[in-house]
Amino acid sequence: MKLGKIYNEDCLITMSRMPNDFIDLVITSPPYDDIRNYNGYSFQFEKIAQALYHVIKPGGMVIWVVADATINGSETGTSFRQALYFKEIGFRIHDTMIYYKNNPMPQTGKRYHQHFEYMFAFSKETPKTFNPISETTKYRGLANMKNRGKNGSLDYEKVERTKEKKVGNVFCYSIGGGISTKDKIAYNHPAIFPEELVIDQINTWTNENDLVYDPFMGSGTTAKISQLLNRQWIGSEISQEYVKIAEQRLKEHIGKDLFVTI
Ligand SMILES: C[S@@+](CC[C@H](N)C(=O)[O-])C[C@H]1O[C@@H](n2cnc3c(N)ncnc32)[C@H](O)[C@@H]1O
């Protein structure tokens, strides 16, 4: 299979041409609950989940970003059902991470604003790569006992230190025009990933030259970020219009002239 390409076809067809145990990381956001029309294309969830299991390497990961529609006053529960299905067919639900939007669309009615989507991390066996993102935290306090004073009282040292610790599993991003990406052309697609999200997940679960696959490539965010982070990549996108957007985006912003095979 040729790498560095977006295949303009149903991802089930692309995956049927892949060998087993081929991909290190899938990062994707499927077209869930018909929330958006995406030029009328839909997907066969169960078949796709099974195909993903075959093409992912042992120790590989699937980062599956989803949310529920609200229909007749109730959230559909699709996200949970999908997560449990992944588990049923052999994946582990390694982590239920959250993609938190700092600035979501406001909600009306008797609901709080919808700030997050699930970002499930499914693993095939134990993850083989984990490069945790860390942050610097400040510690201030009376931590160290220094001396026992003459009168037997305890004498504590005032300390102020910084230390590195890995971040939590809620990832916060601002989104929207000019923020999710600087690439204007990407906004011709209705539901793009913030680039920062893809950077964080690719850095966490892969090393350079690993192979990243996005079965629902949309405007090409995963392709662009993989290329910039020196990962190999491959993608599927069923809509020709979106493939053209991705092609143009990659050409303009990373100088990669894509040759789309199908
Ligand atoms: C949520 S969008 C992905 C957006 C992408 N993450 C980005 O940053 O631009 C889902 C995409 O899946 C595509 N799609 C729907 N069914 C598909 C299928 N069976 N195979 C491949 N792509 C499909 C839609 O056309 C849509 O562009």
Image (cartoon, rainbow, N blue to C red):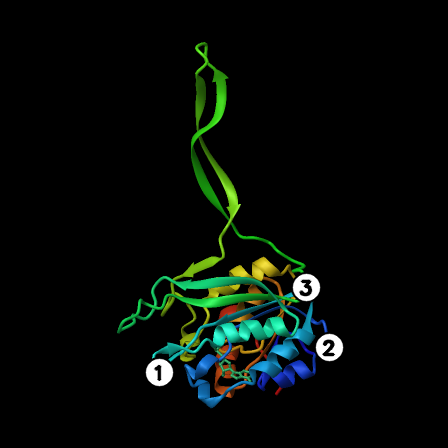
User: Disc 2 vs disc 3: which is toward the camera?
Assistant: 3
Q: How many marks?
A: 3
How far apart marks 1 and 2 lie (CA) works out to: 42 Å
Residue at 37 percent across and 67 percent down: it is 178
The earlier-in-sequence mark between 1 and 2 is 2
- Front residue of 40/53: it is 53
SS at mark 1? Answer: loop
Reading the image, the residue beneath label 2 is: 19
Question: Where does label 3 land, which residue?
Answer: 125
Ranked by sequence position, the earlier of labels 2 and 3 is 2
Identified by mark 2, the residue type is: Pro
Looking at the image, can residue 49 be seen? yes
Q: Residues within 10 Å of mark 1 (few under 14, many from 20)?
A: few
**Residue 161 relative to residue 174: left or right:** right
Task: Tell me the residue that label 1 is attached to.
Answer: 72
Ligand 1 within 8 angstroms of badge 3 C-beta: no
Q: Amino acid at mark 1?
A: Asn
Quarter that holds the C terminus: bottom right
Looking at the image, is 112 positioned above or below residue 235? Answer: above
Task: Assign a secondary structure to mark 3.
Answer: loop
Q: CA distance from mark 1 to mark 3?
A: 38 Å
User: Horizontal and vertical percent for residue 150?
Assistant: 45, 9
Rendering coords of residue 194 (x, y %): 45, 67
